[in-house]
Image (spheres, rainbow, N blue to C red):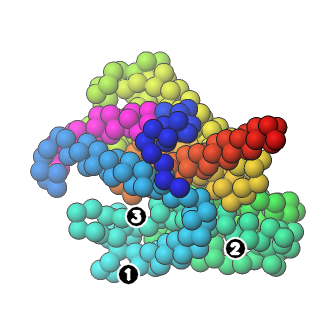
């Protein structure tokens, strides 16, 4: 069923829509503010101060256009495409590891060059895992209490996915994807004893992964006391905390950040929130958090509504999207504030990054489509009830 612009507006969850629109808009402004100095100094940008702004705006337009197309796709078709998309995502995770195809930056091979830009398969995989986990849980609903039939097949594919992500390495994406899969399985009725046991095993596995990797262990040490080595392991976090401290209540003013002037690495990507804190203060951070809370609340509300209508795939997909973006936002905020160890995860809807912005927009389109179909079925039910009463 295609939606005309007028019909789409009538059926959109405007609270959800505006929370995302405001996050995207604020992100565009802050990416520009945080990247001006770097764009003027880098030869690759042609010394143009608007370089990152223009690229981010282009990706944003692409994301909105693709989201408009994704909104036209019925939820039933997304369910049928879940497995092929997941397999395609797994193929891309393998492809990115091949020298000459995958592009290496700062010791990580996470990008596939497309000529004019790069694609990050792990960002796509987050969305594909939401769809696959929701579809898998619906298909295996009768076996959710059976470890062998209900969970083991899912465990096998997630181990493969995790192994590919660790080869890049992209530990942050692994944490987010694992959270998505576990949450969807739990919401879909996975036996709570199995779930509790898996939480313990995952916690132990993450500890082993951290201890066995020198660079991850250094990040933990730097996180625990960034000031002990402020020019080494704790450099990024210490400057992020300085940015938060300088912002105080209302910030130093838009464009007034000092930390973005080559002191804070990745100011326009992973540490965008620190620049927001410095320039807009506690008030700006409160607005960002409030917008994310509204979005996440509506995502779970849409999922709950679909569940009440016995649309189980739609319900789990909506809640999976809520889990994905809330976990990623929470980790990014925690890293910026020094609550969590430094991790390479962007702030959804806001940080600079082509693949991330486009995939986030597609996820929102799917969420809005689920809500629109909920509303359409509600209207159908009311019409049927009125016809029944007249009869």
Q: Earlier in the sequence, mark 2 or mark 3?
A: 3
Image coordinates of residue 212 in percent, x first then y, are 59, 70
Circle 3 residue: 120
Furthest toward the top, the residue is: 250
Structural crowding at the residue carrying mark 2, measured as other residues with C-alpha within 10 Å and reported as few (<14), some (14–19) or many (≥20): some
Structural crowding at the residue carrying mark 1, measured as other residues with C-alpha within 10 Å and reported as few (<14), some (14–19) or many (≥20): few
Q: Earlier in the sequence, mark 3 or mark 1?
A: 1
Q: Residue at x 51, y 59 (%)?
A: 73
Q: Residue at x 68, y 45 (%)?
A: 380
Q: Element under label 1?
A: loop
Q: Element under label 2?
A: helix
**Residue 271 seen in the current view:** no
- Which mark, by number, is residue 154? 2
Image coordinates of residue 251 in percent, x first then y, are 40, 21
Q: Residue at x 29, y 69 (%)?
A: 113
Rendered-image quadrant of the C terminus:
top right
Dominant secondary structure of the magenta stretch? Answer: helix
- Magenta-drawn segment: 20-42
Distance from disc 2 to disc 3, alpha carbons, whole Å, reads: 23 Å
Quadrant position of residue 97: bottom left
Q: Earlier in the sequence, mark 1 or mark 2?
A: 1
Circle 1 residue: 98
Residue nearest the viewer, comparing 64 with 173: 64
The nearer-to-camera label among 1 and 2 is: 2
Distance from disc 3 to disc 1, alpha carbons, whole Å, reads: 14 Å
- Which mark, by number, is residue 371? none
Distance from disc 1 to disc 2, alpha carbons, whole Å, reads: 26 Å
Is 36 one of the magenta-colored residues?
yes
Structural crowding at the residue carrying mark 3, measured as other residues with C-alpha within 10 Å and reported as few (<14), some (14–19) or many (≥20): many
Seen in the image, is 308 located left or right of residue 251?
right
Seen in the image, is 71 located left or right of residue 322?
left
């Amino acid at each position: 069923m295609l939606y005309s612009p007028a019909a789409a507006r009538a059926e959109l969850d405007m609270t959800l829509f505006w929370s995302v629109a405001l996050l995207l808009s604020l992100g565009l402004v802050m990416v520009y503010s945080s990247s001006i100095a770097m764009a003027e100094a880098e030869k690759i940008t042609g010394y143009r101060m608007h370089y990152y702004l223009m690229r981010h705006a282009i990706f944003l337009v692409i994301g909105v256009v693709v989201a408009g197309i994704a909104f036209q796709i019925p939820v039933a078709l997304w369910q049928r495409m879940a497995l092929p998309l997941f397999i395609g995502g797994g193929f891309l995770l393998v492809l990115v590891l091949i020298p000459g195809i995958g592009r290496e930056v700062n010791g990580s091979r996470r990008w596939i060059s497309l000529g004019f830009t790069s694609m990050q398969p792990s960002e796509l995989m987050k969305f594909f895992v939401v769809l696959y986990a929701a579809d898998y849980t619906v298909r295996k609903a009768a076996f959710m209490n059976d470890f062998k039939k209900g969970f083991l097949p899912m465990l096998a594919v997630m181990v493969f996915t995790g192994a590919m992500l660790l080869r890049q390495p992209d530990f942050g994406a692994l944490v987010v994807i694992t959270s998505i899969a576990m949450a969807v399985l739990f919401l879909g009725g996975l036996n709570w004893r199995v779930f509790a046991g898996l939480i313990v095993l995952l916690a132990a596995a993450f500890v082993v992964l951290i201890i066995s990797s020198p660079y991850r262990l250094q990040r933990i040490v730097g996180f625990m006391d960034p000031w002990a080595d402020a020019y080494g392991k704790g450099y990024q976090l210490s400057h992020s905390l300085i940015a938060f401290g300088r912002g105080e209540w209302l910030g130093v003013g838009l464009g007034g950040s000092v930390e973005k002037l080559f002191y804070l690495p990745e100011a326009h990507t992973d540490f965008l929130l620190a620049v927001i804190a410095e320039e807009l203060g506690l008030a700006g951070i409160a607005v960002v958090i409030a917008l994310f809370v509204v979005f996440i609340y509506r995502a779970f509300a849409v999922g709950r509504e679909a569940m009440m209508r016995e649309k189980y795939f739609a319900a789990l997909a909506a809640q999976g999207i809520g889990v994905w973006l809330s976990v990623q936002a929470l980790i990014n905020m925690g890293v910026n504030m020094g609550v969590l160890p430094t991790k390479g995860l962007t702030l959804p809807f806001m940080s600079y990054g082509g693949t991330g912005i486009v995939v986030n927009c597609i996820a929102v389109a799917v969420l809005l489509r689920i809500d629109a179909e909920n509303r359409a079925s509600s209207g159908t039910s009311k019409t049927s009830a009125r016809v029944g009463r007249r009869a």
